[in-house]
Image (spheres, rainbow, N blue to C red):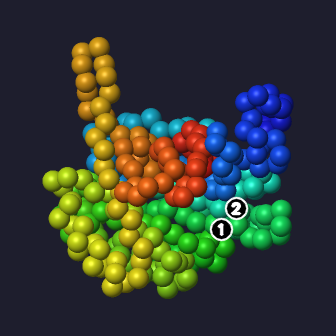
Amino acid sequence: MNLASGPVPSATVPAAVETGGLADTLGRPLHDLRISVTDRCNFRCTYCMPKEVFGPDFAFLPRADVLTFEEIEQVSRVFVGLGVEKLRLTGAEPLVRRDLPVLVAMLAAIRRPDGAPLDLTLTTNGSTLRRHAGPLAEAGLRRVTVSLDSLDDEVFGAMNGIEFPVARVLDGIAAAVEVGLGPVKINMVVRRGINEASVLPMARWARGTGVTLRFIEFMDVATRTAGGWTRWSGPTSSSPSSTRRCRSSPSRRAIGARSRPAIGTPTGTARSG
């Protein structure tokens, strides 16, 4: 990939960029970069990658169009030079990307201009976290966020689309805690009439285990067509544009940065958040 595409006209560059950093249109600094390492996932969550849409014949990105580890490292170094302090690896499901600890080690070696290490994190569905937690921690990963929508196997299986058991995700979370990938954060997408009864059990579990539980409200979105409105079928990102965090914060769009604003780019490449 070629990053030397020439200077951007100054009229389109926020003031903070011209002085060496990245900022949104209100001049607020951007410190977080979210990087999608793959558009593939082993789950078929109903609000994200429903199996009716993402079936066996679905055309995912050609391998040649997905950034290599070297390209991801190059892009990350550019952003770190512009003030980014935190890198978050996502997907769809990042742990389906082969040799991911190799990339983690490459990114963990990057230093900020002041010499400080980066805050290197990862968001996952937790299905293979037991196997990967140790190698990821050894490579330099600092924290993980796990998606878990219910402690009830029937509810969770229906939502993840493949009847994946809760126990294996909980075991992955335990593995992350064991190797020091904490504090572990849990994202729960709440859907009316589907898993809202799981809210209190999840809260009690989180309180007892010490993980940080974050509720995400599902917003059903429709698309206007010539024949009327059709139900939204879901994006290919691990951070669905149909959800938003139940808290006051700057706009996250489909990704976002908790208390800090975000900028976004296509799935399969580098994104902020």
Q: Is residue 236 left or right of residue 115?
A: left
Q: Is residue 22 left or right of residue 240?
A: right
Position in image of residue 13 (x %, y %):
74, 35
Q: Which residue is mark 2?
A: 85
Given residues 261 and 209, the one toward you in this image is 261
Position in image of residue 204 (x %, y %):
27, 79
Quarter holding residue 84: bottom right
Quarter holding residue 54: top left
Q: Which residue is mark 1?
A: 119
Position in image of residue 61 (x %, y %):
53, 38
Q: Which mark is residue 177?
A: none
Residue at 24%, 67% in the rendered image: 199
Q: Amino acid at mark 1?
A: Asp
Residue at 28%, 57% in the rendered image: 190
Question: Compared with residue 118, is residue 236 higher up or lower down, i.e. above or below?
Answer: above
SS category of the residue bearing label 1: strand
Can residue 151 be seen? no
- Rounded to the nearest whole Å, what is the CA distance between mark 2 and mark 1? 6 Å
Residue at 54%, 77% in the rendered image: 181
Q: Are marks 2 and 1 in contact (CB under 8 Å)?
A: yes
**Callout 2: few (<14), some (14-19), or many (20+) C-alpha neighbours within 10 Å?**
many
Q: Amino acid at mark 2?
A: Glu
Quarter holding residue 248: bottom left
Q: Is residue 65 left or right of residue 53?
A: right
**Callout 1: few (<14), some (14-19), or many (20+) C-alpha neighbours within 10 Å?**
some
